[in-house]
Image: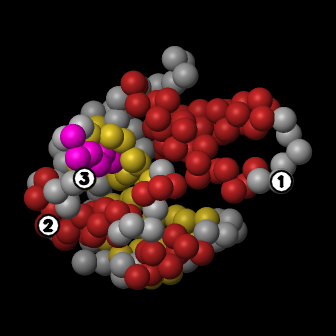
Amino acid sequence: MRDLVAFPSGLPAAPKACLPENLRLRLARRGDLPFLLELYGSVRAPELQGCSWPPRRQEAFITDQFRLQHTHYLRAHPTADYWVVDRIEPDKAWVPIGRLSLDRNSRDWHLIELSLVPIERGRGRGTALIRWVQRAAAAASADSVGLHVARDNPGAIRLYARTGFRRAPSHFSTHARLCWTP
């Protein structure tokens, strides 16, 4: 993991008041890479169920795929925001539960990635983060927020549809393009 490119510093976050009090966004740092790899592995785990590869090969595959995705994101969106989503514990300690990557360097924002650890999914946190992006886009007078989501991820497609995203033409056979307009 040492050879991965560091995260850019990006734009400052929107006002904290927009997020639920128990969540925060902070810029990702090199020290977050092990957590982000684990999160990535949890997202890709369903694809590997029933795979005949031994565990070490599966781990190597996930590590390589994470490295490729990380490098691609940083090259394709060099000035985007790469945030870790933290949740506060009862003892007031912040723990990482996800990531939100957002390119807001044009009038058409691009939501690169939103993912949460499995235990945090289905609890309204994804909706809260999408609503935060929408409020921030509206406050910044952005023209739209767009994203790509895997066509074989109906749960994510339903989530984005519930929050007002609509299908748009996509150049990718494997991914749907969704857009939201303030």
Q: Which residues are magenta?
A: 84-91
Name the residue furthest top: 2
1 relative to 119, above or below: above
Quarter assignment of residue 174: bottom right
Query: Which mark sits nearer the N-terminus, 2 or 1?
Result: 1
Q: Residue 22: tell me if it is visible.
A: yes
Q: Nearer the viewer, mark 2 or mark 1?
A: 1
Q: Helix, strand, or loop for circle 1?
A: loop
In magenta segment, residue 65:
no
Provide residue 143's location: percent of width, then percent of height: 27, 71
What is the quadrant of the C terminus in the image? bottom left
Q: Amino acid at mark 3?
A: Leu
What is the quadrant of the N terminus in the image? top right
In magenta segment, residue 85:
yes
Q: Amino acid at mark 1?
A: Gly
Residue identifier under label 2: 139
Residue identifier under label 3: 23
Q: CA distance from mark 1 to mark 3?
A: 35 Å
Q: Who's the residue at 59% across and 48% down the image?
A: 42
Residue identifier under label 1: 50
2 relative to 153, above or below: above
Quarter assignment of residue 71: top right
Q: Amino acid at mark 2?
A: Ala
